[in-house]
Image (cartoon, rainbow, N blue to C red):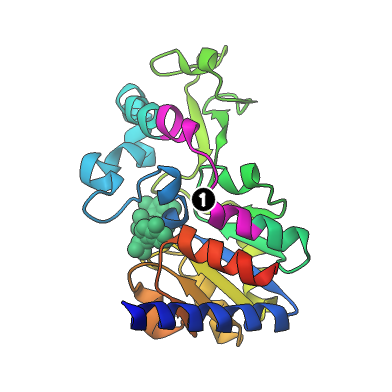
Amino acid sequence: MQDENNEFMEQVQLAVETIHASRHCTGFTGAGISVESGIPPFRGDNGLWSKYDPMVLDLSYFHRNPEESWKVIKEIFYTFFGKAQPNAAHTLLAKMEQQGMLNAVITQNIDTLHHQAGSRNVIEYHGSSRKLVCTSCGRETEPTEEVLKGSPPRCDCGGVWKPDFIFFGESIPSEALAQSQYEAEHCDCMILIGTTGEVYPAATVPQKASAHRATIIEINPSPSLYTDQITDIFIQAEAVKAGKALQKKLFA
Ligand code: APR
């Protein structure tokens, strides 16, 4: 236990020194950063995909079965996510940006918690849940209770609303792709929080950063696909524990 704590503090110290020495640091986050905000991850025993069929987020399935897909989308992404609050790991990244220690956060999450924590330069690699787009006329709207009432929710033109995050079978938004590419090529430090490295093309972002010689700091309670491949400093802990320890040392 004592050894584990010493190892944890050593890695935190190394991360702090790396961040202080960095000229351009970028965050890269996955579902794990929001677990302690009450949002379950996708994979693993208690993951969303053990309860729901990922098929509901397949684009062609959604077009064929909008009512069924929307039932699950509402349950997961609006009723449930809607209540979540940012935690110490989200605020760490927001504070770092405010203090000029972080250039951007690239997130695979669609939960908007980075914005809620105060981060400004957030690259939403998979889009976000804060907007709906009409599949027929292309109009955009906010997912208010009123709009979400329908089953499936429909635009005035009769088209079905679709959340503005990407479904399986859709491409990464081009602006997010270009901005992430830029970050990966220009950062000298990348902080990965709560991500498996199993989902492509997102996983290529930290790989590219490492290939461009960025130091990779990883926070995750369990080793990921990145840990042995590209991670330089592994803080083996939950996001909140690591986030609090880093905040204490970085802003002391
Ligand atoms: N703190 C930090 N990391 C955690 C925590 C925690 N409290 N709890 C779990 N994790 C880690 C897990 O060990 C795992 O590595 O977070 C990761 C969660 O894995 P996934 O749910 O697979 O999330 P992610 O890799 O972000 O998935 C990416 O998958 O289905 C798609 O589009 C979806 O954006 C999502 C993508």
The correct choice, above or below, for 130 with respect to 136 in the image is below
Q: Quadrant of the C terminus?
A: bottom right
Residue 65 at x, y percent in the picture: 31, 27
Q: Quadrant of the N terminus?
A: bottom left
The correct choice, above or below, for 3 with respect to 237 in the image is below
Q: Which is more toward the observer, 62 or 84?
A: 84
Q: Residue 139 occupies which quadrant of the picture? A: top right
Quadrant location of ligand 1? bottom left
* x 38%, y 15%: residue: 151
Residue 3 at x, y percent in the picture: 35, 83
Magenta span: chief secondary structure: helix
Span colored in magenta: 77-93
Which residue was labeled with disc 1?
126
* x 37%, y 84%: residue: 228
Q: Which is more toward the observer, 12 or 197?
A: 12
Residue 87 on the magenta span: yes
Tally of numbered discs:
1
Residue 11 on the magenta span: no
* x 48%, y 45%: residue: 166
Drawn side of residue 60 relative to residue 176, left or right: left
Q: Amino acid at mark 1?
A: His
The correct choice, above or below, for 224 with respect to 150 in the image is below
Q: Residue 229 occupies which quadrant of the picture? A: bottom left
* Mark 1 residue crowding within 10 angstroms, few (<14) / some (14–19) / many (20+): many
Confirm or reject: label 1 Cβ below 8 Å from ligand 1: yes
Q: Secondary structure at mark 1?
A: loop
Q: Which is more toward the observer, 49 or 100?
A: 100
Residue 70 seen by the camera = yes
* x 51%, y 50%: residue: 126
The correct choice, above or below, for 187 with respect to 180 in the image is below
